[in-house]
Image (cartoon, rainbow, N blue to C red):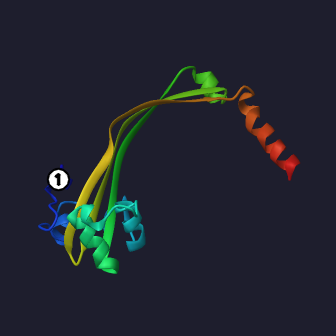
């Protein structure tokens, strides 16, 4: 995994770009401003600064020079199951959803990575079911109720 190649206090911002984590090019990146970085990395005010990871501590002390990036990648496969007619007429729809999700956090100050972390779901598997007893008339009933209440 490319994120594992990122080493705090060794990897530069240009090197993470070369690994494919480029916030200027990637579509699935969120740039986290400093105040939100604090709430993400040190959510409990009662934890002493000394107890935090060195990179997190340095980020907090760097104030506005610190920036975090969250890179999100996922793959989702959706397969409908059941009766075609019930699905087509919006009476009953069953969708089997499988895939995976990955989220990588990289904290940078002055072109140097201070901290990195990752999370996600290596295997997602769930079923979505939607039942509308009135079928195609269901949305019309909801619309009529909305209009009546206005």
Q: Residue at x 16, y 59 (%)?
A: 6
Using the rendered view, name the quadrant where residue 68 is placed.
bottom left
Q: Is residue 52 visible?
A: no
Of 143 and 49, the residue lying toward us: 49
Residue under label 1: 4
Q: As drawn, which residue projects farthest toward the top?
A: 83
User: Residue 62: x, y in percent?
Assistant: 28, 78
Q: Residue at x 29, y 67 (%)?
A: 49
Residue 134 located left or right of residue 2 = right
Q: Residues within 10 Å of mark 1 (few under 14, many from 20)?
A: few
User: Residue 10: x, y in percent?
Assistant: 11, 67
Q: Residue at x 83, y 43 (%)?
A: 145
Of 60 and 28, the residue lying toward us: 60
User: Residue 101: x, y in percent?
Assistant: 35, 44
Residue 126, relative to residue 33: is it above or below?
above
Using the rendered view, name the quadrant where residue 58 is placed.
bottom left
């Amino acid at each position: 995994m490319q994120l594992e190649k990122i080493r705090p206090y060794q990897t530069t911002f240009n090197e993470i770009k070369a690994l494919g984590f480029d916030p200027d090019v990637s579509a699935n990146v969120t740039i986290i401003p400093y105040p939100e970085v604090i709430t993400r990395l040190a959510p409990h005010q009662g934890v002493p600064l000394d107890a935090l990871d060195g990179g997190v501590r340095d980020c907090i002390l760097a104030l506005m020079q610190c920036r975090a990036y969250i890179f999100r990648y996922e793959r989702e496969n959706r397969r409908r199951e059941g009766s075609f007619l019930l699905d087509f007429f919006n009476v009953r729809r069953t969708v089997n959803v499988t895939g995976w999700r990955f989220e990588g956090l990289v904290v940078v100050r002055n072109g140097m990575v201070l901290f990195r972390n990752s999370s996600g779901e290596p295997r997602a598997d769930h079923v979505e079911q939607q039942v509308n007893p009135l079928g195609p008339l269901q949305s019309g009933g909801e619309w009529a109720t909305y209009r009546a209440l206005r």
